Image (tube, rainbow, N blue to C red):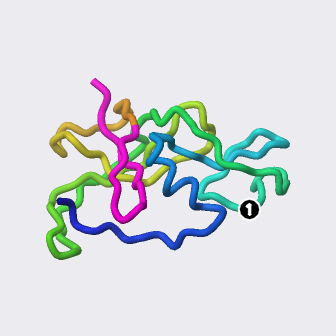
C-alpha cells in the first residue's frame, strides 16, 4: 500500500478533477464560451471571465515538460526515490499538471517522454499520476 497522499479540500468546483478517475476520466475545467481550459479548477474562466465553465474529460496523455527526482523521505513510509514532474497535456493548451511519474525506474524518466494518466485511489480521491508510454 502507498503512503497517504495529502487530501485536497473538495468543493463543487474541484470535485470532478479529484473524483473523475473513478470513471477513468481526467477532468479539466473548460469554458463553454471561449473554449479555453483552466487549471486548477476555478468557478470562472481565467481567459474571458465567463461563469459558463464545466469539467471536460480530456485524453489524459501528454509529455514531461520538466522533472526532478526526490530522494528525501518527507513522510513516514514514503518510498524514495520518486519522480515529481510537470506534464503538458495533449490537446489542452496551457495546462500543465504537477504530478508523479510511476511504474518505471526513476532513471528511465527524461524530458519529453510520452506519458498517460493512471489513477491512484485513496479514500475516494483519485490522484492523477502518469506512466511512460512505450
* Helix, strand or loop at mark 1: loop
Q: Position of residue 75 (x, y in %)?
A: 22, 75
Q: Position of residue 107 (x, y in %)?
A: 17, 42
Highlighted magenta segment, given as a residue range? 117-134
What residue do we see at 63% from left, 38% from top?
93
Answer above or below: position of 10 versus 23. Answer: below
Answer above or below: position of 22 versus 11. Answer: above
Q: Quadrant of the C terminus?
A: top left
Q: Which residue is mark 1?
A: 43
Nearer to us in this view, 113 or 22 = 22
What residue do we see at 39% from left, 46% from top?
66
Q: For the residue carrying disc 1, how many other residues have a C-alpha within 10 Å: few (<14), some (14-19), or many (20+)?
A: some
Q: Is residue 36 magenta?
A: no
SS majority, magenta: strand
Q: Quadrant of residue 117?
A: top left
What residue do we see at 57% from left, 46% from top?
27
Nearer to us in this view, 117 or 22 = 22
Horizontal side of residue 116 vs 71, given as left or right: right
Q: Position of residue 61 (x, y in %)?
A: 45, 33
Amino acid at each position: 500500500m502507498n503512503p497517504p497522499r495529502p487530501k485536497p479540500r473538495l468543493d463543487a468546483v474541484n470535485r470532478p478533477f479529484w473524483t473523475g478517475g473513478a470513471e477513468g476520466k481526467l477532468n479539466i475545467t473548460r469554458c463553454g464560451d471561449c473554449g479555453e481550459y483552466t487549471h486548477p479548477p476555478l468557478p470562472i474562466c481565467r481567459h474571458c471571465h465567463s461563469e459558463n465553465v464545466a469539467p471536460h474529460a480530456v485524453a489524459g496523455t501528454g509529455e514531461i515538460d520538466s522533472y526532478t527526482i526526490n530522494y528525501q523521505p518527507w513522510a513516514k513510509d514514503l518510498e524514495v526515490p520518486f519522480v515529481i514532474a510537470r506534464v503538458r497535456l495533449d490537446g489542452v493548451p496551457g495546462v500543465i499538471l504537477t504530478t508523479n511519474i510511476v511504474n518505471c525506474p526513476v532513471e528511465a524518466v527524461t524530458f519529453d517522454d510520452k506519458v498517460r494518466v493512471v489513477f491512484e485511489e485513496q479514500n475516494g480521491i483519485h490522484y492523477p499520476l502518469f506512466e511512460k508510454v512505450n
